[in-house]
Image (spheres, helix red, strand yellow):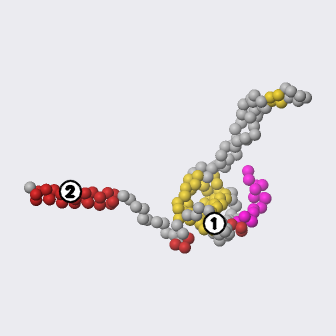
Amino acid sequence: MVSIGRNLETKGVIMALLTLVLMNISCEDKIDNPAVNPSEGKTVEVSLHIGFADEADGYTVATKSGTSTGKGAFSYELQPNAMTKGDVSVKPDLLYNLEIQQYDQSGKRIGGMPSAVMQQATGSAITLSLVENPDCQLVIVAWGDGNTSPRLGTGNTLEAVQKLSIDASIINNIP
């Protein structure tokens, strides 16, 4: 009887160890990192949805207000805005020549897109690999259809990017 008890005890220990091994094997560790220059630091994958919010005027009254006065020489009553029946949206459906660059606090480019995306639908997701940095700035520019210069580029500092401008004729030609 003693040998049967020891065999059961040994088999129980083996089963417990085997169960622990199988539990550790079933846990998935992500070990496939994207190819990154080690000098740039750790990267994180970021998904951005770039779109346009509906225009809202915070200074107009949506419905008739109960705020009024009849005292004094003048009286007033807040009125809602007059609304027309036409609803023309001036939001673009595509972002042309979209560039996203990441800069650290010293103004040095630390990540972003290697080149511009020619067309990106508004509201759709764009996924980038950016350097993990809790104190950085993203610069997002859609240069417009047909406008190929200037560019943020990968060699510019934040100070140089802030000085970029485009000709007024390009803006005036927007339909």
Q: Is residue 68 left or right of residue 18?
A: right
Calculate the distance from the C-alpha at mark 1 to the C-alpha at mark 2. Answer: 57 Å
Q: Position of residue 14 (x, y in %)?
A: 22, 60
Quarter-wise, where is residue 166 in the image?
bottom right
Q: Camera-side residue: 87 or 52?
A: 52
Quarter-wise, where is residue 2 in the image?
bottom left
Quarter-wise, where is residue 62 in the image?
top right
List the single residue furthest toward the bottom: 39
In this rendering, the answer to whether 133 lies above or below 79 is below
Q: Which mark is residue 12?
A: 2
Using a 10 Å C-alpha cutoff, classify the residue at mark 1 as few (fewer than 14 neighbours), some (14 to 19) or many (20 or more): some
Residue visible at 58% across and 64% down?
133
Magenta region includes residue 174: yes
Residue visible at 63% across and 50% down?
51
List the single residue furthest toward the right: 73
Q: From which residue to which does the magenta span run?
A: 161-175
**Residue occupied by mark 1:** 104
Magenta region includes residue 172: yes
In this rendering, the answer to whether 84 lies above or below 47 is above
Q: Amino acid at mark 2?
A: Gly
